[in-house]
Amino acid sequence: MNQITSFLFSTEDRADQMEHWEIRVSRVGEDRFMIMAEEQQLRQMYGWNKVEASTEIEAFQMMVQRIKTDEGSRRTLPKKPVKVGRPPKE
């Protein structure tokens, strides 16, 4: 299993409110990483994306740039756990 490294990043959004992001980086191959970001207060996220980078720091910086320019698929997470159904009876 690949190790996931978490970084914290804070920035002001367009409404001058602070956003606090947790960015997760996981190496999946030589010069390839999976990255994702989750905003801690507004519960928004960028899903896992595959990027080419030479280091974890470079992959982290790519996600920071994505957050700052608001490119990609930012989506709001549900506030409550979503029920997916009951387990089958035995």
Image (tube, grey):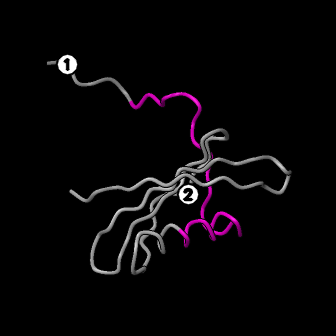
Mark 1–mark 2 distance (CA, rounded to whole Å): 36 Å
Q: Position of residue 71 (x, y in %)?
A: 66, 69
Please report the residue visible at 51 percent of the width from the left and 56 percent of the height from the top. Answer: 23
Mark 2: few/some/many CA within 10 Å (<14, 14-19, 20+): many
Q: Secondary structure at mark 1?
A: loop
Q: Going from the N terminus, do you reach mark 1 or mark 2 first?
A: 2
Asked if marks 1 and 2 touch (Cβ < 8 Å), the reply is: no
Q: Is residue 27 left or right of residue 9?
A: left
Q: Residue at 61% x, 52% y: name it.
A: 75
In magenta, the rendered stretch is: 61-84
Q: Which mark is residue 45?
A: none
Q: Which residue has dot 1 on it?
A: 89
The image position of residue 46, as x and y in percent, is 55, 57
Q: Find residue 45 and report its horizontal and vertical position in percent.
A: 57, 51
Q: Is residue 33 left or right of residue 76?
A: left
The N terminus: image quadrant: bottom left
Secondary element under disc 2, as helix, strand or loop, is strand
In the rendered structure, does residue 82 fall within the stretch colored magenta? yes
Locate residue 70: give its quadrant.
bottom right
Residue 30 horizontal side relative to residue 20, left or right = left
Seen in the picture, residue 64 relative to 44 is either above or below; the reply is below
Density class for disc 1 (Cα within 10 Å; few <14, some 14-19, many ≥20) is few
Q: Which residue occupies 38% across, 71% down?
A: 33
Q: Is residue 32 magenta?
A: no
